[in-house]
Image (cartoon, helix red, strand yellow):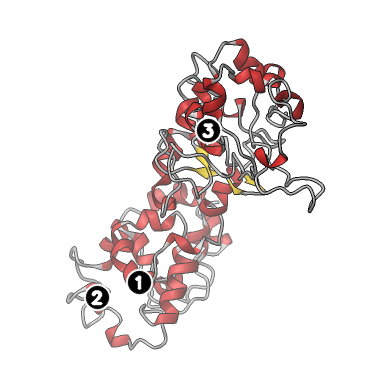
């Protein structure tokens, strides 16, 4: 039996490595029998003596194990005691021995094809000649299957052997549990602890492998959704996040929105100048010792603004400003109530936010997005200026 190459690095989370058998692929068996493979093989029998049905088997669900007719070719069952093969069975106490249970492997498999290609039975059922009663441990391991299913000797597509959904993706849910990439798999797609933090490299380089199991909507659920899974962040992340948020702002923004998430939380926690609990005299100390908020002297006259002025900071990194401030913060200064035909009625200190020569660029900016303009200017004014 040979498994396909790509996403065949699949097994239950209970599997230890690629050298183990997945209890999802090969469900647990119950074999209340006494048997010795080594004894039969040393006595002259071969695999097909007892498993002749495998020659024509085309499905994993086919029954390829010997029953009484195969045994009677060599054994006189009328003279043998039932307990010879069924240990503990007492005919006087029970009508029939305990039944064996060989659940169907969750695979697509064709013995007939493999027999036709003269693949030795022992290649897939390794070690069977050394054991008495064969079990799941004598079924093929993934690393064995990959020896042939390399895309050259045998097909390497996932669905060559793995069951699939009507959508064409692999079936991941079974009665025995979910199917997951195993530990130490040769394709580097192990879904171990904290995989949500390091899956991006695999998703960008092995996207086709990911899509063999996952639909695009699963990605969008986290990347575009408003609700994120809690395991993304470790415990006490609220206390730990400031340094990461400052150094990896773009990464934070892939999930969180400043205005609707960060600022709302900072307001509730009292760590932003918009919070009612913060005293006005203390609000700007987060920006350093220099006063960066005014371009006016004590007589109200406009003066030259140095590099520490907030205009330079806002132009350089407006995103950081937005983590604490809303547009209303800006309008407290950058708005006025007169004349009404030019500006909306917004009370402010009438500080002009536009740099020198801004009029030459305002039409282009307004044509791209006039939302910022309309915070202060009404439609009539913008139309008269040729911005709309």
Label 1 neighbour load within 10 Å: few <14, some 14-19, many 20+: some
**Measured from the top left, where is residue 227 in percent x and y?**
55, 62
Marks 2 and 3, the one that precedes in the sequence: 3
**Measured from the top left, where is residue 171 in percent x and y?**
64, 40
Closer mark to the observer between disc 1 and disc 3: 3
Residue 324 visible (yes or no): no
Residue 341 visible (yes or no): yes
Marks 2 and 1, the one that precedes in the sequence: 2
Kindly identify the residue that appears in the image at 65 percent across and 34 percent down.
163
* Quadrant of image for the N terminus: top right
Specify the farthest residue to the top: 117
Describe the element under mark 3 as helix, strand or loop.
helix
Per the model, the C-alpha gap separating discs 2 and 1 is: 9 Å
**Is 124 displayed left or right of 48 in the figure?**
left
**Is 315 displayed left or right of 93 in the figure?**
left
Q: Could you say which is closer to the camera, residue 330 or residue 90?
A: 90
Give the total number of marks visible in the rendering.
3
Describe the element under mark 2 as helix, strand or loop.
loop
Describe the element under mark 1 as helix, strand or loop.
loop
Closer mark to the observer between disc 2 and disc 3: 3
| Residue under numbered circle 1 | 351
Q: Could you say which is closer to the camera, residue 315 or residue 118?
A: 118
Kindly identify the residue that appears in the image at 36 percent across and 65 percent down.
353
| Residue under numbered circle 3 | 138
**Measured from the top left, where is residue 37 in percent x and y?**
55, 29
| Residue under numbered circle 2 | 296
Per the model, the C-alpha gap separating discs 2 and 3 is: 85 Å
Kindly identify the residue that appears in the image at 27 percent across and 74 percent down.
293
- Quick check: marks 2 and 1 in contact, CB under 8 Å? yes
């Amino acid at each position: 039996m040979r498994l396909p190459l790509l996403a065949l690095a699949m097994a239950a989370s209970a599997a230890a490595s690629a050298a183990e058998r997945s209890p999802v692929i090969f469900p647990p068996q119950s074999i209340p029998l006494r048997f010795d493979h080594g004894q039969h093989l040393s006595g002259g029998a071969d695999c097909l003596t007892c498993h002749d049905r495998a020659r024509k088997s085309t499905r994993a669900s086919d029954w390829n194990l010997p029953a009484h007719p195969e045994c009677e070719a060599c054994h006189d069952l009328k003279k043998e005691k039932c307990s010879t093969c069924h240990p503990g069975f007492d005919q006087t106490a029970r009508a029939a021995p305990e039944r064996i249970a060989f659940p169907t492997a969750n695979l697509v498999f064709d013995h007939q094809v493999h027999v036709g290609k003269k693949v030795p039975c022992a290649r897939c059922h390794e070690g069977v000649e050394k054991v008495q009663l064969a079990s799941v441990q004598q079924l093929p391991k993934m690393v064995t299957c990959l020896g042939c299913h390399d895309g050259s000797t045998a097909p390497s597509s996932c669905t060559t052997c793995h069951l699939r959904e009507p959508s064409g993706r692999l079936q991941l849910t079974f009665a025995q549990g979910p199917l997951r990439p195993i530990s130490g798999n040769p394709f580097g797609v192990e879904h171990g602890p904290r995989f949500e933090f390091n899956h991006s490299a695999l998703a960008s380089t092995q996207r086709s492998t990911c899509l063999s199991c996952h639909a695009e909507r699963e990605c969008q659920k986290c990347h575009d959704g408003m609700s994120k899974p809690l395991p993304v962040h470790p415990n006490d992340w609220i206390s730990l996040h400031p340094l990461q948020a400052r150094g990896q702002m773009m990464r934070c923004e892939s999930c969180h929105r400043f205005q609707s998430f960060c600022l709302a939380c900072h307001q509730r926690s009292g760590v932003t100048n918009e919070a009612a609990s913060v005293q006005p005299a203390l609000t700007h100390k987060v920006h350093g010792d220099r006063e960066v908020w005014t371009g006016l002297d004590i007589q109200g006259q406009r003066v030259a603004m140095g590099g520490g002025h907030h205009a330079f900071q806002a132009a350089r990194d407006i995103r950081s400003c937005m983590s604490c401030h809303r547009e209303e913060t800006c309008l407290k200064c950058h708005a006025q109530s007169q004349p009404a035909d030019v500006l909306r009625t917004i009370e402010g200190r009438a500080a002009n936010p536009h740099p020198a020569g801004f009029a030459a660029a305002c039409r282009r900016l307004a044509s791209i997005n006039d939302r910022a303009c309309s915070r202060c200017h009404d439609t009539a004014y913008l139309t008269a200026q040729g911005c709309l």
